[in-house]
Amino acid sequence: MKKDIHPDYHEITVVRTDGSTFTTRSTWGKAGDTLTLDIDPLSHPVWTGGAQRLVDRGGQVSRFNKRFGDFGLN
């Protein structure tokens, strides 16, 4: 390996949204730093199965519904 081209790989503490912590190795920050997560598997709808909210103010979804809203498969 070439010297002085690789980032420092050290231990950091990660704090999840619920306050729980764990230690991992990373190139982020400096040794002993704390990384606080805004989104993690405990809170993000992709992992929790939460409902998705679609925000569309007169955009493509509204135009689609206006155009095909009466289209039925009956």
Image: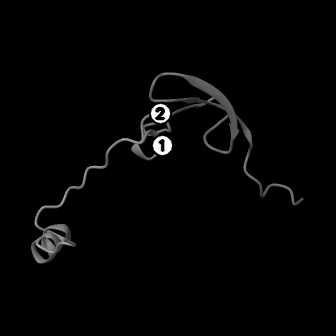
SS class of the residue under badge 1? helix
Judge by depth and name the residue closer to the eye, 39 or 1.
39
Q: Label 1 neighbourhood size at 10 Å, few (<14), some (14-19), many (20+)?
A: few
User: What percent of the width, then of the height, locates residue 69?
Assistant: 13, 70
Q: CA distance from mark 1 to mark 2?
A: 7 Å
Q: Which mark is first along the chain, 2 or 1?
A: 2
Q: Label 2 neighbourhood size at 10 Å, few (<14), some (14-19), many (20+)?
A: few
Q: Which mark is residue 42?
A: 2
From the viewer's perspective, tell me whether residue 26 is left or right of residue 38: right
Judge by depth and name the residue closer to the eye, 15 or 11.
15
From the viewer's perspective, tell me whether residue 52 is left or right of residue 14: left
Q: Residue at x 19, y 71 (%)?
A: 74
The answer to the question of whether label 1 and label 2 lie on touching residues, with beta carbons closer than 8 A, is: yes
Q: Residue at x 63, y 26 (%)?
A: 22
Judge by depth and name the residue closer to the eye, 12 or 44.
44
Task: Tell me: residue 55, above or below residue 49.
Answer: below
User: What percent of the width, then of the height, locates residue 39?
Assistant: 44, 40
Judge by depth and name the residue closer to the eye, 73 or 48.
73
Q: Which mark is residue 47?
A: 1
Task: Tell me: residue 57, above or below residue 13.
Answer: below
Task: Tell me: residue 1, above or below residue 70.
Answer: above
User: What percent of the width, then of the height, locates residue 43?
Assistant: 42, 35
Q: Amino acid at mark 2?
A: Leu
